[in-house]
Amino acid sequence: PPSIEKRYYISSLPAIALRIANAIRKHWKIENNLHRQLDVNFMEDGCVANTGNAAENLATFRRLALNSLGSGKGLLARRKKAGWDENYLTEIVRKFFIKNF
C-alpha cells in the first residue's frame, strides 16, 4: 500500500496550494543539489567524524570549500588541483575573500 507522509511548513504566503507547492519544490531542488554536490565531491555521507563538534566543523569546511571552488563541472578536478598546487589554492582563497569580505 502507498504510504502517506505529512509535512508542516510555516509561511507568510497566502494559502494558495499551487504557490506553496511550487515554493516547496524549489526549496528542495536547491537543497538536494547542494547535498548531492557535497556527497559526490566531498564524500559527506561517508564521514564518520562524530566526536565533539567534529562533524559540524567538517561540514562547515566542506561548504566553505564548495563555495570557494564553485560548483558544477570540473569541481572534483579543481579540488584535487587545490590539494596539489599551493599557488592555485592561494589564488582560490584570495578570490574567495575578495568576493565575500
Image (cartoon, rainbow, N blue to C red):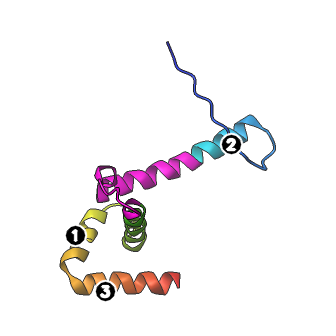
From where the camera sits, is residue 74 visible? no
Residue 90 higher or lower than 19, as above or below: below
For label 1, the crowd category at 10 Å Cα-Cα, with few meaning under 14, some 14 to 19 and many 20 or more, is few
Number of marks present in the image shown: 3
Q: CA distance from mark 3 to mark 1?
A: 14 Å
Residue 68 higher or lower than 16, as above or below: below
Amino acid type of disc 2?
Tyr
Relative horizontal placement of residue 10, taking residue 57 as reference (left or right):
right
Look at 30% across and 58% down and name the residue there: 41
Amino acid type of disc 3?
Thr
For label 2, the crowd category at 10 Å Cα-Cα, with few meaning under 14, some 14 to 19 and many 20 or more, is few
Look at 66% across and 38% down and name the residue there: 21
Check whether the beta carbons of the residues at disc 2 and disc 1 lie within 8 A of each other: no
State which region is magenta. 27-55
| Residue 65 location, quadrant | bottom left
> In the rendering, which numbered label is found on residue 80?
1
